Image (cartoon, rainbow, N blue to C red):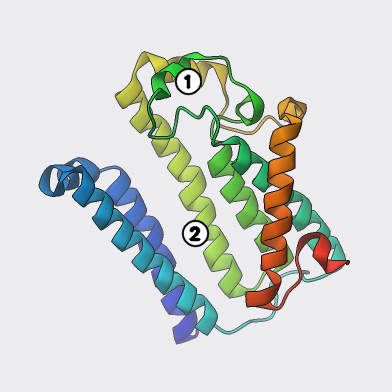
Amino acid sequence: MSTELASLIAASATFVGTHFLMSHPLRAAMVKALGANGFQIAYSVVSFGAIGWMYFAFKAAPVTTPLWTGFDDASWAVASVLTLLAMVLLAGSFVGNPALSAPGAEQAALKEPHGAFRITRHPMMWGFALWALAHAIAAPTARTLVVTIALAILALVGARLQDGKKEVLMGEAWAAWESKTSYWPKLGNIGAIGWKTWAIGTVIWLAASWAHIHPSGWAAGVWRWL
């Protein structure tokens, strides 16, 4: 293993580990010691520091031989579809999401699930996980897999931990939301996502895949074939 890849593994582990620690076991103590605003500042500094380390370690890590077939049209087509769905779920996660720290969260949890929440109560987290899976399929090099595995763990384990935290914070309201929604995606309900969410998600997908070309040199999404 190269020194650069080891650094990327360490950076990814730091990003995931500090996020879990600050979001759960250390959160109360940090808020008590630093205050709510101080906690947010410390959380942001640590998170952005870890992300920066990940970015530079990723750029420095060598591009190794793919661990399985990748970089071909079939792999990129599958990855493009997964990434589109990820962006649609992400777009749908911002409207009426009781998991977000916003006024009216408990009232939102008592309502009937709509749109992306008919698929999963964690559309944002599953959006990140699908994004990670898509990149693992399309570019299965060692450095890409380190980052995608880290992000998938952060998203899916984080979603489970979020359920536990919300059960304590919101009590019956979150219990009611859990009874009406699913952690695991129910793709049979994909038709429940409204056309507006699909449109917004598609625009995000087109913009993100176009922007992918410039830093990486790789055309993603439909731009690969245009």
Position of residue 155 relative to residue 138, above or below, is above
Mark 2 vs mark 1, foreground winner is: 1
Which secondary structure, mark 2? Answer: helix
Q: Is residue 166 left or right of residue 86?
A: left
Nearer to us in this view, 19 or 89: 89
Residue 57 is at least partly visible in this image? yes
Q: Position of residue 207 (x, y in %)?
A: 69, 58
Position of residue 144 relative to residue 87, above or below, is below
Q: Is residue 25 left or right of residue 152?
A: left
Q: What's the mark number on residue 108?
A: 1
Q: Position of residue 221 (x, y in %)?
A: 78, 60
Which secondary structure, mark 1? Answer: helix
Mark closest to the chain's N terminus, 2 or 1: 1
Q: What's the mark number on residue 118?
A: none
**Label 2: how many residues lie within 10 Å, few (<14), some (14-19) or many (20+)?**
many
The residue wearing badge 2 is 150
Residue 75 is at least partly visible in this image? no
Residue 138 sits in quarter = bottom right
Q: Residue at x 38, y 14 (%)?
A: 172
Q: Residue at x 47, y 20 (%)?
A: 108
Q: Residue lying farthest left?
A: 33
Nearer to us in this view, 208 or 18: 208
Q: Residue at x 74, y 56 (%)?
A: 206
**Label 1: how many residues lie within 10 Å, few (<14), some (14-19) or many (20+)?**
some
Residue 115 sits in quarter = top right
Q: Is residue 8 left or right of residue 141?
A: left
Residue type, mark 2 in image: Ala
Residue type, mark 1 in image: Ala
Residue 112 sits in quarter = top right
